[in-house]
Amino acid sequence: MSEQVDGAATQKSGATWDNLLRISMREAGVAVALVLIVLFFSATAPYFATTGNFLKIFVQIAINTVLAAGMTFVILTGGIDLSVGSVLALCTVVGATIMTDERLSAGTSITLAFFACLGTGAICGAINGWVCEKWKLPSFIVTLGMLNIASGLARVVSNNSTISGLPQPFVEFGNLIFWGVFPSIFLIAVGVVLVGWFILRFTVFGRFTFAIGTNEEAVRLSGHNPRAIKIAAFTISGLTAGIAAMVYLLRLNVGSPIAGIGYELNAIAAVIIGGTSLSGGKGSIIGTLVGACILQVLSTGLQLLGAEDNVKPIVIGAVIVLAVILDTYRNKILRLMESRQR
Amino acid sequence: MHGDEVSRPRAETAATTEQPILRLQSVGKRFPGVVALRDVSFEIARGSGHVLLGENGAGKSTLINLLGGVLQPDDGEIWFAGARYQPASPLEAFKAGIRVVHQELHLLSNLSVAENLLFEQVPSRWGLVNYREMNRRAAELLAEVGLDVAPTTEVGRLGVAQMQLVEIAKALCHESKLLVLDEPTATLTAREVDRLFAILHRLKAKGVTTLYISHRLEEIFEVGDEVTVLRDGQHVTTRALDGLSIPNIVELMVGRTIADHGAIGTAAPDGEEALGVSGLKLAADSPEISFSVGKGEIVGIAGLVGSGRTEVVRALFGADPKAGGTIRIEGQEVEIASPKDAVAHGLCLATEDRKGQGLLLEMSCAENMTITDLTRVSRRGLLQRKDENDAAARLVRGLRVKTPSIHQAVRTFSGGNQQKVVIAKWLFRGPKTLIFDEPTRGIDVGAKAEIYELLGNLAAEGKGILVVSSDLPELMAICHRILVFSKGRISGEVPRAEFDEHRILSLAYQEYGRVRAS
């Protein structure tokens, strides 16, 4: 018995080191991958390592990053949200309709559109969560339903047409570039990620998000109500779909009922590449940001290398699967480290 | 009486000309922290009806799992039908000729009876299923066990007894040499039991050996020639059933000893009630359960596995719905519809399934300990890491949890340390009454003693404690009073002064006997 105690004491420094390594491995692994990919394209693809190109990448990353940030919450609780793409479409037409209303001044219409976008998204998300929990349905099915419902609603609201003619100050803000390389919409996306990171890391709600994904029954038997937390996670995902819709309007300046098709899959891909486990409980939103970067860098880099449009999805598909395969090895290594530590 | 050569006493085995169908030689099986089987050797004669008995935790299930290919022994050898028997999987086990009918049935409920029966050898032609042949053969098998249903019936629509017969028919179709039946009559009515026995006799006439496990002691005389008794993972005896009585058999099963661990010596303080349960019903037609736990009192719940112990504590904690009854906390009647309500009233439950229901395995020791009451380590919804780490460090010291760091994932902990984390998380919440379901299952002796000491200390602080355990000597060592459950009802209550393993065990078996007799 005394041997064990001594062993524990001498291992203390080793343990902290291992802990650091374990925490960093989840995020650092993907970050290293991103750096390697960037270096590779910088060396091989013409024009890749230019300010103009990075600016373009940052513009293109924004929408997916915001969607994926919200998706991270849902996936961490063990669910999935397939509806974010069409909820985004619904939000863009709601926002654009309000902003193009001639009775309102530019400032009022932008403010109203902002809250309407976020509100619409949050309501869709809350409905997703509430239906899932009320009838104990798999989120895959419920959000698949919402995908169609929101898409239909978007057509109804927009009368099946794109809505353009957004107020000038709004369009100008969307075109702003800070420090020569950071577009405004990218900074919004980074802001969303930082807020998400803070919530997950420092709040009681964040702790419950991880705990439910790890073992929902244990959380319930500890005297809590997992339902409320799960509904909140879906609401956050809907809310970020609303924010992403604002970003979409800032970038493309039109509300469209057919916006966002397939966006949910890109968002899920970013979350998974970022190291979050589809079964919940493990992952990080910083990883998600890096995952979104990897997807876009690959896409842009391949294009600059002269790859055909048809080849790009093949490579990106392979990378998604590769990321998950690498994740299983990462978990094996972590377990090995832990068993050595014991 | 059933077969000539098989009812001879075991001492003459060497003299018998025929080889035993099954021979265990110094078989041992260990799990982390516990020895489930230790040096078990016995033989089962070909064509005999062999009965395996033992208290909860005696090692019966482990033995069945070894035979069924679910587990592999750590020590010793098993010989079956004259050859070394080393199945790596259940499939290999029944290919070799051993068929285990588990207590929980493993049927594919949305397939037909015929598909279930012939699942491993579907009659086919050019890769297409030959349904006519399949149903014909299934009908034959069903006739053999006397089950009158169409082979095309969906299994999910059958009753439990019928499913049991399908499982047995399945064993027949594989021409099993050894049929292992684990508690086959647990859910059957008296008539169905009679039919099952008729089938077993017919099988025996065909030369099939059966290994029979049952809680209902009086029925073993109808199916068995010989009996093997296990106690504490060790072989006690193998002998002919002829001449043995039920009291003799109970005598063989009891007598387990438990290491001395400074058990509580004081009598129950006759103070106020901590927890009271009146007329608790699990289902509309189930018996009513009433009992109470005093402040500073440790009350044990004994009974066989499946006697309703776990179901009752889960229902009173609000983990599962209940059909009726009232619950009092400190004399006040309270409404408990969910674990959240229970915890709010100062109740807590350490479940029997530590890993599945108690712990967040992938999360850290500290995170597990504070999950019951995060308001204490947060301010306005923001976690205060320092408060959390301090609280966790205090609990780790107080309960002597062995871990290099409070940030270590509890998945890496031993069973005993994991259980301490479960206890710690409830102590963090500051409950008034604690319920423990199998608190020492799978835990090594040293950690067990520490947990007993902890329970004693908690009681001394005036908390009410309810302990469900399959380990009777353990309950007798730590409890002021033991409630005995038998088939869903409380068959007796034994105060500390009258603790007697024999008596408690008889009470535990009581209701099972009654059903057969009726």
Image: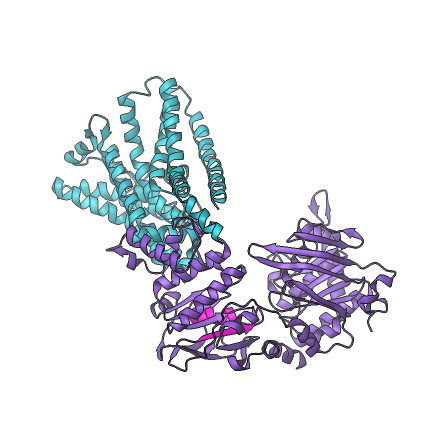
Chain colours: A cyan, B purple
x%, y% of residue A192?
A: 27, 41
Q: Quadrant of the C terminus of chain B?
A: bottom right
| The quarter of the displayed image where residue B358 is located | bottom left
Above or below, B150 against A6 in this view is: below
Q: Is residue B428 left or right of residue B453?
A: left
Q: Is residue A52 left or right of residue B212?
A: left
**Residue B309 part of the magenta segment:** yes
Q: Would residue B322 be seen by someone viewing this image from the given angle?
A: yes
Between A54 and B151, the one nearer to me in the picture:
A54
| The quarter of the displayed image where residue B116 is located | bottom right
- The magenta region covers B296-321
Residue at 14% across, 41% down: A102
Q: Residue furthest left?
A: A105
Q: Is residue A276 left or right of residue B483?
A: left
Q: Quadrant of the N terminus of chain B?
A: bottom right
Q: Would residue A148 be seen by someone viewing this image from the given angle?
A: no
Between A261 and B227, the one nearer to me in the picture:
B227
x%, y% of residue A48?
A: 33, 21
Above or below, B499 against B169 in this view is: below
Between A113 and B379, the one nearer to me in the picture:
B379
Query: Total label count?
Result: 0
| The quarter of the displayed image where residue A317 is located | top left
Above or below, A36 against A225 in this view is: above
Residue at 34% across, 70% down: B345
Above or below, B385 against B235 in this view is: above
**Residue B454 part of the magenta segment:** no
x%, y% of residue B149?
A: 68, 65
